[in-house]
Amino acid sequence: IREMIEIVDKKHSRFGIASCLIGVLNLGYVGLVALDDSYGSNGFLYHLTRLGPAGLLGLIFILLFYLLIPAIGNGLGFLVGTVELFNTQHKKLFAVLGVIVNAIIPVSFLVGLLLLIFRNQ
């Protein structure tokens, strides 16, 4: 009975919740950027690259929007969720969900990259 009381008394960790929230927000962000890219010539990023000599600045923004922000977000969320998985004082539900959600984008990217490589051979 004492073990069951300890399990019930455990609370969700703030780091686990943060990991899950970071993952969900990052998925939404990537979806928003992909939606903007699907608009083609009406999208925000398209206009950034068509500004004449300032088009180089647009390419830097594309690098930032498509690679750096999602990579930093997923890395941070994955790290926080993984650290929280080893904490025995809290429930692990949100930490597990955070690790899974933060792994979706990198795994999808790698699968897509492998498909691109093997289809073009």
Image (cartoon, rainbow, N blue to C red):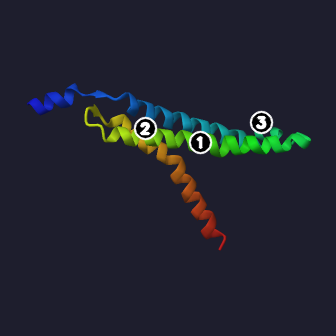
Q: Which of 81 and 37 is in front in this view?
A: 81
| Secondary structure type for disc 3 | helix
Q: Distance between the residues labelled 3 and 2?
A: 32 Å
Residue 54, image x, y percentages: 87, 40
Q: Which amino acid does label 1 sit on?
A: Pro
Q: Distance between the residues labelled 3 and 1?
A: 18 Å
Count of number-bearing discs: 3
Label drawn at residue 95: none
**Which quadrant is home to the N terminus?**
top left
Dot 3 corresponds to which residue?
44
Q: Are marks 3 and 1 in contact (CB under 8 Å)?
A: no
Which sits earlier in the primary sequence, circle 2 or circle 1?
A: 1
Residue 46 visible to an observer of this rendering: no
> On screen, 60 above or below 5?
below
Residue 32, image x, y percentages: 64, 36
Q: What residue type is labelled 3?
A: Phe
Outermost bottom residue? 121
Which sits earlier in the primary sequence, circle 3 or circle 2?
A: 3
Residue 99, image x, y percentages: 42, 43
Label drawn at residue 70: 1
Which sits earlier in the primary sequence, circle 3 or circle 1?
A: 3
**In the picture, residue 121 is in which quadrant?**
bottom right
Dot 2 corresponds to which residue?
80
Q: Which residue is drawn at 63% across and 64% down?
A: 116
